[in-house]
Image (tube, helix red, strand yellow):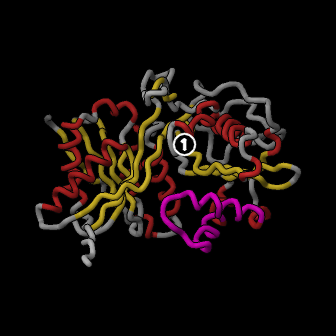
Amino acid sequence: MDNIRCVRFPGLEAAVEAIAPYDDGFMNFCVGSLHEHLHKSSESDKFKKGHFFGLYRGEDLELTMTVHAAHDTTWKLLCPQDRQSSLTPAFLDIATNLLVDAVLQSVDSQTAFQVFGYKAAVDAFAAAWTSRAATKGINLSIKPLYSTVSSYATRETIPPLPSTLPTSALALATMADFDELIPLYLDFSTYAPGTRTREEDEARLRGLIPSRLTWVYRVDGAIVGFISLGRPSPKTIAIRHVYVLSAHRRKGIAEAMVGAITRYFLGVQPAGGEGVFAKPPVAGVKDFVCINAVDIAASRVYRRAGFLFPEQTADGVEKGGVDPKSGQKGWFYSVLRGIAKTVPEETA
């Protein structure tokens, strides 16, 4: 395979500019995160000190591998949607070894870190990294931390607004909701990978609410659920949190929240909710609303809201999930892998 090359972008702004043409439903974790850090970099220089690589075949960007801040230990490895079919095992072997060469200029081979992204690429990179370390006498292990399925919705995929629940129960969260909302947010966080202190979660929520990207759902005046978005790029935004109290689950509340918010950010009216969505989104109208699901079985509520998750047959085969506009697969498996030195087992 000729003309495969790895490019190191000289900084955050250069990475944003180079990757901008690839701002699609598969790239939100990369492009959206870059834009978030570009915004944060105006507040603190620590958000400018990341590492940003692009893997090209000719003039086509095939993969991006980025870590967006000096204190971040999770690299993101993604591919544009129209390049997914080109990621053959032979290509990934060459590409990930080039990425290993590049990352080794920034990260010591014994440093523990994590990689999140497109499953085939992440697994190939992890294998190449540990193999390279082994040639230096360093034994590393790969730890599977979690697996998800990533997809998106567009104006062409969303169904008519469901009328089963009053979306007027949705309201933009304000700091006045913090004390009532924090128990729900803390419970949601127990399902996330890794561990955080209560103080860290409270700080995260205090940062989320002022961004005007979090909504609460009320029943009889009490908050019973919330939905929160993030990673806005020029063309995409991601639904990051969807939570409903256990006593109110299986009543269609999650579907009502996801459906209304998705329509709102895609600029499709009516979005539902009298006056709630009267003004345009603060982050702007998008072409793609992205989301991650724990697995295909858990994605049913999102599929009903227009997300391109496939259906799974009884024998485990995925069917559907094709973008009606592009004809391309509208979902991919994503994984988080941890890479660290192998800890010898204690002997009795």
Q: Position of residue 171 (x, y in %)?
A: 78, 49
Q: Position of residue 166 (x, y in %)?
A: 82, 38
User: Given the current orientation, which residue lies at the most extreme bottom position?
Assistant: 348
Q: Quadrant of the N terminus?
A: top left
Q: Which residues are magenta?
A: 180-205
- Which residue sits at x=57%, y=30%? 154
The quadrant where residue 136 appears: bottom left
Instruction: Determine whether, in the image, residue 217 is placed left or right of residue 282.
Output: right
- Crowd tier of the residue under label 1, counting other residues whose Cα lies within 10 Å: few below 14, some 14–19, many 20 or above: many
Identify which residue, 213 or 149, lies in the foreground: 149
The quadrant where residue 103 appears: bottom left
The residue wearing badge 1 is 291
Check disc 1 and report its element: helix, strand or loop. strand
Can see residue 326?
yes
Q: Position of residue 266 (x, y in %)?
A: 63, 34
Identify which residue, 258 or 236, lies in the foreground: 258
Asked if residue 199 lies in the magenta stretch, the reply is yes
Can see residue 264?
no
Total labels: the figure holds 1
- Which residue sits at x=26%, y=65%? 107
Q: Is residue 254 above or below residue 193?
A: above
Kind of residue at badge 1 = Ile
- Which residue sits at x=27%, y=53%? 126
Identify which residue, 335 or 91, lies in the foreground: 335
Q: Is residue 45 above or below residue 191?
A: below
